Image (cartoon, rainbow, N blue to C red):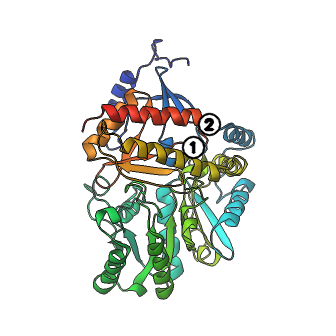
Amino acid sequence: MRHCEHPTGGPVTNADLLKRREAAVPRGVATATPVFAGKAANAELWDVEGRRFIDFVGGIAVLNVGHRHPKIVAAVAGQLDLYSHTAFQVVAYEPYVALAERLNALAPMAGAAKTIFFSTGAEATENAVKIARAATRRSGVIAFRGGFHGRTLFASALTGKVAPYKQQFGVMPPGVFHAPFPDAEAGISSEASLAALDDLFAADIAPHDVAAIIIEPVQGEGGFRIAPVDFVRQLRAICDRHGILLIADEVQTGFARTARMFAIEHYGVEPDLMAVAKSMGGGFPLSGVIGRADIMDSVEPGGLGGTYAGSPIACAAGHAVLDVIAEERLLDRAEAIGAIAERRLEQLAARNDTPPITGIRRLGAMIAFDLPDAATTKALCAEALSRGLILLSCGVDGRTIRILVPLTVSDAVLDEGLAILGEALAETRG
């Protein structure tokens, strides 16, 4: 790969760019690795110095169809030949309407559905709450500890973790309450979580004042904790009993990652609203809210939208993403990738020359495992990077390693990445 060039004519290095980044960009936006992208394709990335990496992060679940999938590139190029922006609120365009139609048909809810588009995951979660409040004429929202719903102010209020998402930013917007997320390893059963919800109704907010309960079927930043089926089904019953809307945050779990189009499909439960983003755009900023038509129509004209919301370019990419998922059978591929990774992790866990591996879990190809502490995960990520593998940690206590490899990865690259993971583990010390 040809190296990038510095304005003075010499090659650009990661160190050069890191120094410029530190001078020009505030430290509030963290970057997990000290490398800068030069080029990427499918599940591989080359930095500005030409070094190759296998990508097990996928832009944090954005690249289920891989970097620069040819169909995405072609769709975007075709749209660029027509128009790049009009603002849907001024002059509408067919790609937006057609993509909404396709998602409405895929929505795991009975009856008519409607979809509105935005740009980011935080916009999706916040607008889902706005719609729920308009539909119910209530203001309260219940979320879960360990959940992540975005970094804007209200999305931060929904997020169930203080550091780094809430600290320094003062009092969070009112009306948001948190219940414990069921987690067997942490000793929190479904029954305990539901009992805490009852306590919340008794002590803090009456159920008839709650507009919505928002839940990630699999917590993303919270450590890939998978909600138990019985818990989600009981949440649905509670919502039905009290007229509360159930919002599934599918920002990280959606678009084939869990071997279903949406993770909520594993539960036999219909949400009222879904927040979607990340892999829907295949690398282009696109998010949305999908919901029951009567609920979606609760907001008066002008109450929803955004200048760049549902960009024609992003909508074109979104159509191509749905095509690729269907044509390349990525639902099946997600399950196959997950099974391969799980077997390899179980083999690594049985070894005695690595840090202890516990809590191996997955839903489809949303894969995670735990290490003893945050220091060990940090050391592993650094060691893996030095060997050409991009990894990312997560979890309330920072000791979880997550795997979000593109679903289009070849078997050879997947095997190579897992082999590097094993080598890095053997060299890791907390």
Residues marked 2 and 1 touching at CB (< 8 Å):
yes
Q: Is 63 left, or right, of 356 in this rendering?
A: right
Residue drawn at (47%, 48%), measured in percent from left and top? 342
Determine whether 337 is above or below 198 in the image: above
Tell me the residue that label 2 is attached to: 68
Determine whether 81 is above or below 244 in the image: above
Q: Quadrant of residue 176?
A: bottom left
> Which quadrant is the C terminus positioned in?
top left
Tell me the residue that label 1 is attached to: 283
What element does badge 2 sit on? loop
Q: Nearer the viewer, residue 333 or 161?
A: 333
Query: Whole-percent x and y of residue 38?
Result: 51, 26
Residue 381's disc is none
Mark 2 burial class by Cα count in 10 Å: few <14, some 14-19, many 20+ = some
Query: Whole-percent x and y of residue 273?
Result: 55, 70
Q: Is 325 left, or right, of 271 in this rendering?
A: right
Determine whether 188 is above or below 324 in the image: below
Going by the numbered disc 1, the residue's amino acid type is Gly
Q: Nearer the viewer, residue 203 or 136?
A: 203
Residue drawn at (71%, 52%), measured in percent from left and top? 326
**Count of numbered tags:** 2
Query: Whole-percent x and y of residue 48?
Result: 47, 23
Residue drawn at (33%, 33%), measured in percent from left and top? 426
